[in-house]
Image (cartoon, rainbow, N blue to C red):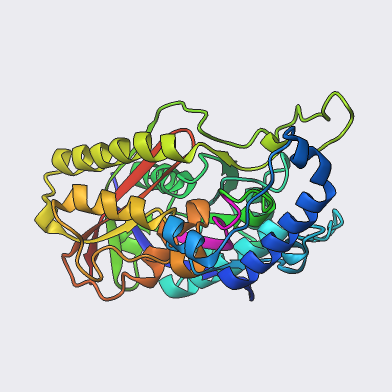
Amino acid sequence: MYTAAITGTGVFTPDQVITNAELVKSFNAYVDIYNAENEDKIAEGSMPAKEHSSEEFIYKASGINQRYVIDKTGILDPLVMHPLLRQRTDNEPSLMAEMALDAAHKALESAGKTAADVDAVICAASNLERAYPAVAIEIQDLLQINGFAFDMNVACSSATFGIQAAADMVRSGSIRSALVVNPEICSAHLEWRDRDCHFIFGDVATATLIERAENATGPYFEIRSTRCATDFSNNIRNNNGFLRRSRPDGVADRRDMQFMQNGRKVFKEVLPMVSEHIGNHMANEGVEAADLKRLWLHQANKSMNDFIGKKVLGRLPEAGEQPNILQDYANTSSAGSIIAFSKYSDDLQDGDTGLICSFGAGYSVGSVIVQKHG
């Protein structure tokens, strides 16, 4: 048995930003158009009027100030309200693969390794650009990696589930190392016309190199233990699968084809599940709350993270103990906890212990206990 370790991470960040102020201006313009077009039905009571959004509402509900996106032009056009992503030819790299490639190169560089040192690629994301061939195999080809690759989807928990799969293979000796990449184009599956969720998501890609600790060329994080759990719930969903079809009247505009969430139920049901999952994982590994130097949590909502942090630590997290990045990136699905880990882990000292956790649709939750070396 080998010791699995995280030796490098990388983050691809799009160059386009949408601030809350920009988003609110666009959304409210859409609302005005919608209400004007449906004025008669609204007046007779057969259709409710849509409400305006506000910067105050968005920040209070989420803690988000802005988000990075692949395309802001379409999103901010009140007559479009979705990203305008060019359909690439079959001879071009897919958008997801291109994003993941950037993050993967950064992860390899930070680990002091090359593609020749990698045996497997796992593309773990909440929404994949196509059904097949696997995006992971395309990324493997672009990196010129010998070995194998596969896609996996556990929604917002995809990154931690991918890390567990990679760590298990490294521990067993079946591979030397694996790249877990998380390209998330969340803007493409968000319903930007829904006031309850129009502010939630952003786009990004992350990559994590997991390899045998003995092969590390610099400081690394030993993966002490991983744990995953799922419990079926339909409260977070996207029904845009291969059986998609138009409504009976022929209009292909079904609301359930985009991100949907019953926010109140999610908050009530997920938080206890995640807190208990982390607590049990730590207890089984003999890790006390006082031992944790850092919590890198899924970046969905500041209030949720504050609640979990308080439950896990038995007190409010101090500055730096539980870094948030969602104020800048928004919710980036599976990539969120990895962005936080990548940006806020270098300062830990030899022997320090931390925990990466992501959670979301499924319900699903994955946690990774790591210890710094070097």
- The percent position of residue 310, horizontal first and vertical second, equals 20, 52
The residue closer to the viewer here, 184 or 101, is 184
- The residue at the point 50 percent across, 36 percent down is 262
Image spot of residue 195 (x, y percent): 60, 51
Q: Is residue 90 magenta-colored?
A: no
Up-down relation of residue 80 to residue 73 (above or below)? above
Q: Which residue is drawn at 13% across and 51% down?
A: 314
Which quadrant would residue 100 be assigned to in this image? Answer: bottom right
Write the residue at 80% across / 38% down.
41
- Image position, residue 24 (x, y; %): 62, 65
**Stretch of the chain drawn in magenta:** 197-209
Snapshot quadrant of residue 266: top left
Q: Quadrant of residue 290?
A: bottom left
Furthest residue toward right: 250
Q: Nearer the viewer, residue 182 or 302?
A: 302
Q: Which of 56 and 239 is in front in this view?
A: 56
Horizontally, residue 6 falls left or right of residue 30, namely: left
Describe residue 168's horizontal placement relative to residue 162 as left or right.
Answer: left
**Nearer to us in this view, 299 or 339:** 299
Residue at x 71%, y 39% (from the top left corner): 131
Q: How many numbered marks, from 0 up?
A: 0
Q: Where is residue 120 in the image (x, y as percent from the top left)?
A: 53, 50
Does 203 lie within the magenta span? yes
User: Which image quarter is the C terminus in?
Assistant: bottom left
Asked whether the viewer can see residue 81, the reply is no
Q: Can residue 273 be seen in this view?
A: yes
Name the quadrant of the N terminus.
top left
Image vertical order of residue 204 relative to residue 236, above or below: below
